[in-house]
């Protein structure tokens, strides 16, 4: 499969997982079963009263990271931050609590704002930096650069090592998938020796809620990727979990899209996404950056 198919699949995968899961965010599995049976269609609605195909913070902040990297690949923090602020000022429907607290404290230095919010809240290990980090794996062929930008973009809002580590682990899995490695082997190679290693051999589902805590989120993402049979199966499983279903769907959908490729995403899913133009522009920019920089993967 061509690299461009995997890059397009990854960004669309985030958007589809987000748009499908947005319908069920904050619901319980029982509530979802009662109202939707098993949700398979992008219908919008839910707590944010979404239009069908409307995406939420997960995709919008992923685009901010992608576009910031494209503006200044060698030093993307400032351009990413400028896009974060444009998005924040657009008064988005959904914005995570930690990220909102950081925006309110931002006075020109993202890392200071993140530290201040962390001290005031007493915690910052949410999944809000993991949900948007994938462009760092798509844009950089060099693993050192991938890891550096994964960490930097996380630290802009989340002052917690567990967030950095999840972003780096996730993006290193993506790096392997872009090279054509098998999904299970790529995950196994990167979670060996980490707190997530046991997900490979779990007898049943993870024994944590599908919550916004980064460690819970990432355990569910890995579980869904290991057990899903196709792109559609992965994002449907996420959407029908409830809890932080849009973010878990976006994160799992990103890697599933990188693995199965854009062709592996059902046409009715990709075609439903309302911001396809902005996604396509980001895909084109990343492909140009990646392939233009000597970059066979
Ligand atoms: Mg969201």
Image (cartoon, helix red, strand yellow):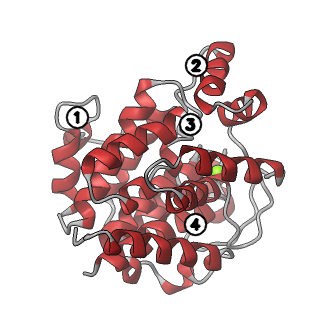
Left or right relative to 155: residue 9? left
Q: Nearer the viewer, residue 46 or 184?
A: 184
**Residue at screen point 51% across, 32% down:** 155
Badge 1 local density, few (<14 within 10 Å), some, or many (20+)?
some
Residue 247 x/y as whole percent: 56, 50
Q: Nearer the viewer, mark 1 or mark 2?
A: 2
The numbered mark, 1 or 2, whose residue comes first in the sequence reads 2
Q: Quadrant of residue 268?
A: bottom right
Q: Which residue is mark 4?
A: 39
User: Marks 2 and 1: in contact by CB < 8 Å?
Assistant: no
Instruction: Check residue 212 in the rendering and tell me which mark sits there, or answer none.
Output: 3
Q: CA distance from mark 1 to mark 2?
A: 25 Å
Q: Nearer the viewer, mark 2 or mark 3?
A: 2
The numbered mark, 3 or 4, whose residue comes first in the sequence reads 4
Badge 2 local density, few (<14 within 10 Å), some, or many (20+)?
some
Query: In what element is the residue under mark 1?
Result: helix
Q: Which residue is mark 1?
A: 198
Q: Nearer the viewer, residue 121 or 107?
A: 107
Residue 142 x/y as whole percent: 26, 54
């Amino acid at each position: 499969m061509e690299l461009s198919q995997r890059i397009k699949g990854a960004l669309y995968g985030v958007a589809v997982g987000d748009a499908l899961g947005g319908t069920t965010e904050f619901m319980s599995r029982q509530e979802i079963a009662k109202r939707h049976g098993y949700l398979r269609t992008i219908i919008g609605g839910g707590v944010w009263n979404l239009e069908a195909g409307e995406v939420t913070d997960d995709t919008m902040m992923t685009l901010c990271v992608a576009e910031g990297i494209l503006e200044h690949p060698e030093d993307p923090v400032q351009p990413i931050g400028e896009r974060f602020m444009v998005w924040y000022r657009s008064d988005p429907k959904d914005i995570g609590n930690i990220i909102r607290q950081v925006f309110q404290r931002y006075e020109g230095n993202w890392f200071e704002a993140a530290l201040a919010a962390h001290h005031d809240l007493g915690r910052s290990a949410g999944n809000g930096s993991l949900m948007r980090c994938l462009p760092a794996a798509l844009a950089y062929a060099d693993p050192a650069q991938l890891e550096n930008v994964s960490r930097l973009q996380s630290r802009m809002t989340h002052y917690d090592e567990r967030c950095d580590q999840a972003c780096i682990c996730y993006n290193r899995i993506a790096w392997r998938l872009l090279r054509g490695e098998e999904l299970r082997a790529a995950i196994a190679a990167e979670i060996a020796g980490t707190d997530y290693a046991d997900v490979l051999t779990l007898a049943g589902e993870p024994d944590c809620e599908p919550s916004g805590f980064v460690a819970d989120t990432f355990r569910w993402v890995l579980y869904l990727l290991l057990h899903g049979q196709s792109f559609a199966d992965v994002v449907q499983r996420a959407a029908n979990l409830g809890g932080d279903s849009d973010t878990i769907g976006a994160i799992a959908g990103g890697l599933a899209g990188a693995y199965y490729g854009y062709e592996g995403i059902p046409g009715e899913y990709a075609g439903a996404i309302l911001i396809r133009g902005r996604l396509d522009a980001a895909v084109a920019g990343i492909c140009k950056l990646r392939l233009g920089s000597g970059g066979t993967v």
